[in-house]
Amino acid sequence: MKSLRYDAPFNSEEARVVHVQLAVLVSIVFVFVAPAQEKVPKPVLVLVEIDESTSNRVSLRLRLDPERSTEIDIAWMNNKWAVVGKHADDMIADAEKNHRGYALKYLALLELKKDRKLANRVAVQATKNLGGEPRELAAFVNKALYADPTAVEYQLALMATTPLIADSREIVSVRIAHLCALVGCGKVREAMVTNRTIVDDLSGKKEDLIALATAICDVNGGRALGAIARRAFDLGRKDRPASELLQMLEYRVLYDLEGNRKAATKVGLELVEAAKESTLNNWLWYLMTRRSTAGKYNSLALIAAREMQKGGNLAYGNMDTVALALFENGLLDEALALQEEAVKKGGSGTSAGIRRRLEVFRAAKKKRDAKKGETKKR
């Protein structure tokens, strides 16, 4: 099967429009065909050409009005901050008490303009204007502030949600936002004490339980709440048909929170086998480069990469995918050798992105070897 992975630049505005329309259709294995731009958040910064924030398109992430979504998505793909910012300002003016305008502006400042300071000013404005709307404020925190949080964003989230929690404990999104803020600020004990009944409180609400388990997997320091996540996950998936998303979450609970690598590997192999039914190369690529999964499943990526290598005679684009998985797992020499083979095999048809990753791997090896030399001198 020919790979659908797309990592060449668009050549026209028309192509971008067609791409947006096609992306709605291509949703097998939670994959959207990704546009070109080299702007992927940690941990694969500068290694891939796609702007993975648009592989889960911003209009879908924020559930934007369909009348605006296409224009916003195209502007986002082209890194047109001014266009996206204007839409965000118009949305805020039209609905000051709705989180979407603030969230769009925050994410655009953070991801397009690369200005966290200005983004956090928007967060302060959103906190002030949405303070009387607990659900809207919690939605802003969960969708925007937690997109790529540092200690500053967790502190902002804590200040925003603490005044709400006493009167809004029945609102699940508020409780999750506040719990994550506590954990992100290092207040793990307080998070555990104040949420000791949260799983019981959500009993029977399967989607909410899954959301809780996912949030704990996402938050920095979430491992301390592994038992809560496990109970939430087990109750949330009970009597539900098996799905890839549930398997992915189970993998995270096992590997990230419980440290059970043996059981996680078993689930990972099941996921890899299922992915073979479509295109394992595409599945692995997006696993490593989408915002929601980048850097979180490196061990699973290695399982998939090894499975791809078993078939032998990889296409040079598939070699590139496997090499990235090897690199993300610290197997630098093996990654470099495979990337060199990919460039050689691709010849003049090798994309700039594949060649660029080769240079990144070479630079990483040079840096590592230099460090080893310094250590020997001592």
Image (tube, rainbow, N blue to C red):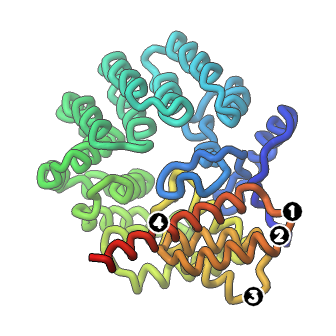
User: Residue 349, labelled with which disc?
Assistant: 1
Q: Name the residue rendered at 32%, 28% in the picture.
A: 134
- Contact between marks 2 and 1 (CB within 8 A): the answer is yes
Q: Position of residue 83 (x, y in %)?
A: 65, 20
The disc at residue 346 is 2
The correct choice, above or below, for 375 with respect to 43 in the image is below
Mark 3 and mark 2: Cα distance apart in space: 16 Å
Residue 205 shows up from this direction: no
Q: For residue 66, which quarter of the picture?
A: top right
Residue hosting label 3: 312
| Sequence-wise first label, 3 or 4 | 3
Q: Amino acid at mark 1?
A: Gly
Q: Nearer the viewer, residue 11 or 187?
A: 11
Please give the residue where the numbered disc 4 appears in the rendered image.
Answer: 367
Drawn side of residue 12 relative to residue 163, left or right: right
Mark 2 surroundings within 10 Å by alpha-carbon count, few (fewer than 14), some (14 through 19), many (20 or more): some
